[in-house]
Image (cartoon, grey):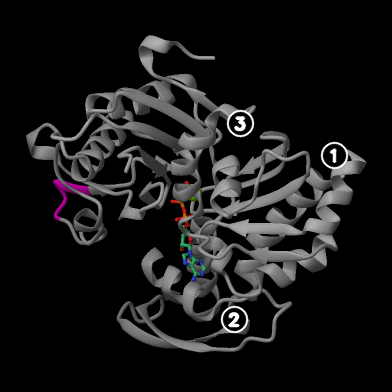
Amino acid sequence: MSNDIGIDLGTTSVIVAVEGKGIILNEPSVVAVDHRHDDKVLAVGSEAFAMVGRTPSYISAERPLKDGVISNHVLTKKMIQQFVNRVYDSRMIKPRVAVCVPAAITGIESDAVVEAVVSAGARQVFLIDEPIAAALGSGIDITQPMGHMVIDLGGGTTDIAIISLGGKVQASSIAVAGNLIDEEIVKHVRQQFQLVIGLRTAEELKKAVACCPQKKFSKTMEIKGRSLITNLPQRQLVKTEDLYEPVMKCVEQIGTAAHQVLERTPPELSGDIYSEGVVLTGGSALLEGLSEYFSEKLKVRVRVADDPVHCVAIGTAKSLTIGDRLETGFYDATPRAGKR
Ligand SMILES: Nc1ncnc2c1ncn2[C@@H]1O[C@H](COP(=O)(O)OP(=O)(O)OP(=O)(O)O)[C@@H](O)[C@H]1O
Ligand SMILES: [Mg+2]
């Protein structure tokens, strides 16, 4: 079996897949550094994640990717190297590695990613766009002359694309996704209940009780935070309806962006999308009621991919086997081969 690997370098998590084997690593994209010792890396992934919000001042747990771009090159590089070293056994033949990078990445940022992967032992490095990888990973045969629409809702960005014949026909990437929903929930809970909560609590609320109003869904969850009035810890029961406002503030923006992409789509492909429907991928595709919202907004069938969280990593690994049939959004970035 080949030891080629696909890496989904996400804002929230880094997921590594091997074609035919599935997911072999899934870790939060967090790095813990010690500022007393030249920003020495103390931990990466889940170990670093456990430190978020709980470190003394000289240690910080950082997300080197933010809003779909690389905000810290050095840490991103160290994080990639550690993850690749965990899955790559140096006794094996050097692997070919495909990396799914955020759509808004610059040349310098992608150079840093390539360098990290090469220094971790790759013999060849390919870069792939997120929507192409998401479409491949959701099982769509994108090499056919048939239009498909994919909306990948991640943590930092939502990528919307119309794909046909192995290439993107229309695309849009906006920095509105799961993380922004969490931030809006924090703000809303503060206003509505005079309660200060952290992003982790907001995310738990989103996963457990949030829903788009198009779906009949009603749950409650008890959260703990700090009262703005007494400054002391306080419990609060939050209902699905309480979260409509912050959730829809973000979801409506994604809906509008998807609508605009469809408006720009050539008629033949619009017809294909009308019959094929739209596929949702990415962790935020798991938000309750999202497919109902999009089908009402876009007037087409919408389905959530079978394994939305892993689609991009699985598609990235798969791209290594069909790369020659991909027209855009996939290229050989190995330093000696030069870039296309
Ligand atoms: N059940 C759920 N309901 C709602 N949101 C969820 C659920 N499970 C995960 N998420 C959200 O999915 C997001 C992470 O998705 P994903 O792993 O696809 O992001 P990423 O690929 O790291 O980010 P990006 O593609 O933007 O770089 C987080 O915001 C997380 O809160
Ligand atoms: Mg992603």
User: Is 32 colored magenta in this rendering?
Assistant: no
**Side of 34 where 113 appears, left or right:** right
For the stretch drawn in magenta, the main secondary structure is: loop
Amino acid residing under circle 1? Arg
Q: Nearer the viewer, mark 3 or mark 2?
A: 3
Instruction: Tell me which label, 1 or 2, sits earlier in the chain.
Output: 2
Q: Nearer the viewer, mark 1 or mark 3?
A: 3
User: Is 57 colored magenta in this rendering?
Assistant: yes
| Image label count | 3
In this view of the protein, which residue sits in the foreground, 148 or 208?
148
**Side of 79 where 89 appears, left or right:** left
Q: Position of residue 59 (x, y in %)?
A: 16, 48
In this view of the protein, which residue sits in the foreground, 26 or 182?
26
Instruction: Tell me which label, 1 or 3, sits earlier in the chain.
Output: 1
Above or below, comparing residue 40 to residue 240 in the picture: above
Q: Position of residue 252 (x, y in %)?
A: 72, 60
Q: Position of residue 128 (x, y in %)?
A: 51, 33
Q: Quadrant of residue 233?
A: bottom left
CA distance for labels 1 and 3: 22 Å
Q: Position of residue 121 (x, y in %)?
A: 23, 28
Residue at position x 61%, y 48% from top?
135
How many other residues sit within 10 Å of disc 1, few (<14), some (14-19) or many (≥20)?
few
SS label for mark 1: loop
- Quick check: is the Cβ at mark 3 less than 8 Å away from ligand 2? no
Residue of label 2: 242
Task: Identify the magenta region.
Answer: 56-60
- Quick check: is the Cβ at mark 2 less than 8 Å away from ligand 1? no
Amino acid residing under circle 3? Leu
Residue of label 3: 326
Residue of label 1: 264
